[in-house]
Image: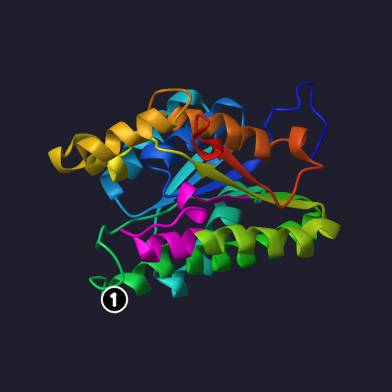
Amino acid sequence: MPNTSSPFDLSGHVAIITGGNRGIGRSIALGMARAGAAIAVLARNKEKNKQVLAELKEIGVPSMALHLDVTARETLSEAIDAVKADLGRIDILVNNAGSVSVTGGILNESPEVWDITMATHLDATFLLSKYAAASMVKQNSGKIINLASMYSYFGAKLVPSYGAAKGGIVQLTKAMAVELATHNIQVNAIAPGWIVTELTELVRESPDYIEFNKMILARTPAARWGEADDIAGAAVFLASSASDFITGITLPVDGGYSVC
């Protein structure tokens, strides 16, 4: 990575954020743009892509939004090539795209839910990292940031496929970090706590989850739900030269939830 006046300056860098048109992904995209990075958002919803692209243009960085379903594995290599063709290079990859189905456990969960969850979280992270890393190796620099979860560590009885996929993200992060370190590529993960997004709306709003919501707040020393912008700062740090000697870690951003 080039030296800059600030270790958190991402000017001259190109960042890809999957699922970057809403929630945590959108906040990461905007946060990296404010730090100076050119941004490529890869996500499914075309209307939301247009909205985030307008926000990026307002910040004033080179940007693009590409319609992409990360479960369509035959399109992933082409998407990486499209970003390089449009923005010139790839310095940062954020594997953020995700989904969750509350099935209640393995007795209720279908093989189809298992397969789509694995494809969205684990398979896409593996393949996009593989394709982006091939480009990063040639320039002898790069940052890969994967989105893990509190359920990478705790039992996820209501969402077993999600927990299994997020647990796999932690191990894949470590494996890639060891392999790619000699190429000056750092690979790390972020494990968000309970964050206000569309995916957590059920837990926050449904009367069926009142007691569960109380448990979350009681266990979180910060005594609040996190905001998507709380994750953006950690992502900018891991994308910047300030983290050049950090690789293979999973950073909790959870208000203290995981230490209680």
Badge 1: residue crowd in 10 Å (few <14, some 14–19, many ≥20): few
Q: Position of residue 58 (x, y in %)?
A: 44, 24
Name the foreground residue: 96 vs 159. Answer: 159
Q: Is residue 4 visible?
A: yes
Q: Would you identify the image quadrant in which residue 102 lies? A: bottom left
**Left or right of residue 207, residue 1 in this image:** right
**Helix, strand or loop status at disc 1:** helix
Residue 185 position (above or below residue 128)? above
Q: Which residues are magenta?
A: 145-166
Residue 1 position (above or below residue 225)? below
Q: Position of residue 205 (x, y in %)?
A: 19, 35
Residue 7 among those drawn in magenta: no
Q: Position of residue 234 (x, y in %)?
A: 59, 34
Residue at the left extreme of this rendering:
207
Residue at 48% x, 47% y is 150
- Where does label 1 land, which residue? 112
Residue at 33% x, 40% y is 50
Name the foreground residue: 44 vs 153. Answer: 153
Q: Is residue 135 visible?
A: no
Residue at 35% x, 72% y is 114
**Left or right of residue 16, residue 238 in this image:** right
Q: Position of residue 86 (x, y in %)?
A: 55, 50
**Left or right of residue 153, residue 228 in this image:** left
